[in-house]
Amino acid sequence: MNMNITLHVWRQKGPDAPGRMEIIQADDISPDMSFLEMLDLVNERLEAIDIESIAFDHDCREGICGMCSLVVNGIAHGPESATTVCQLHMRSFKDGDAVYIEPWRARAFPVIRDLIVDREAFERIQQAGGYVSINCGGSPDANAILVPKPEADTAMDAASCIGCGACVASCPNGSAMLFVAAKIGQFAHLPQGQPERFRRARRMVEQMETEGFGACTNHFECEASCPKEVPIKFISEMNRDFIKAVLKGE
């Protein structure tokens, strides 16, 4: 049976414009729709009556790209755990529900329009050191550099981060520690990442601070809201590498 939902949507024309919550009725919504498909339908109906559509980010709609950055009923990516908004379905709500939709709230993520925020700060953190710059020549044979399976698995756990920013949006301090730790950790557990390991940690942490993200005070909201369940143990590893970089002068 289809549902009628009352949406309370954040509307803002630009970074310097005042924002407001706007009530929009979403009637005859199939419970099998994804949350973004519901927004698509609402936008079609708004455009049909010459009302400006709701601006929101999306791309792959497969839980991979991290673009669908929405706070739904006060929770980053909505009420389902380990789920992005594009994987969230309307069956998670009930007929007659009021659903509040807001953008990420963080000083380092200014609102561009409605539900879209500027996450270029993440790109600048990556550019500060989230890469391997050592010239290794041509592609080696698959088993030329042996990596123990536990280390490879841990590196993959870190690499699963999609850079959506849910950790920032859910943190009371607006901290990006889990994101940065994951991007550092994916190299810290591989041989290719060792030559620049400590310098990488220092540069990326310093860039994170420059961007205006808050500090970590162990609320653990970042881990709870991460759609890829990246564990907070990477924050401890990052802190350790950062301290070593400072002591080594790297």
Image (cartoon, rainbow, N blue to C red):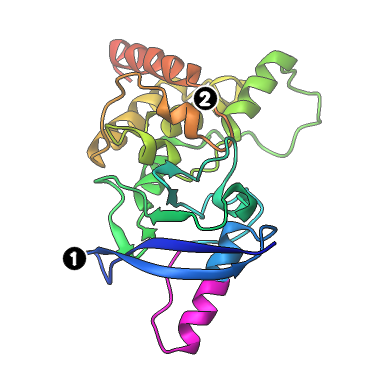
- Is residue 158 shown above or below 101? above
User: Residue 85 in magenta?
Assistant: no
Residue type, label 2 = Gly
Q: Residue at x 42, y 14 (%)?
A: 236
Q: Secondary structure at mark 2?
A: helix
Pointer 2: what residue?
Answer: 185
- Is residue 223 shown above or below 148? below
Span of residues in magenta:
41-56
Is mark 2 in CB contact (under 8 Å) with mark 1?
A: no
User: Residue 52 in magenta?
Assistant: yes
- Is residue 222 shown above or below 166? above
Pointer 1: what residue?
Answer: 18
Q: Nearer the viewer, residue 16 or 144?
A: 16
Q: Nearer the viewer, mark 2 or mark 1?
A: 1
Q: Secondary structure at mark 1?
A: loop
Q: Nearer the viewer, residue 101 or 68?
A: 101
CA–CA distance between discs 2 and 1?
39 Å
Where does the C terminus fall, quadrant-wise? Answer: top left
Where does the N terminus fall, quadrant-wise? Answer: bottom right
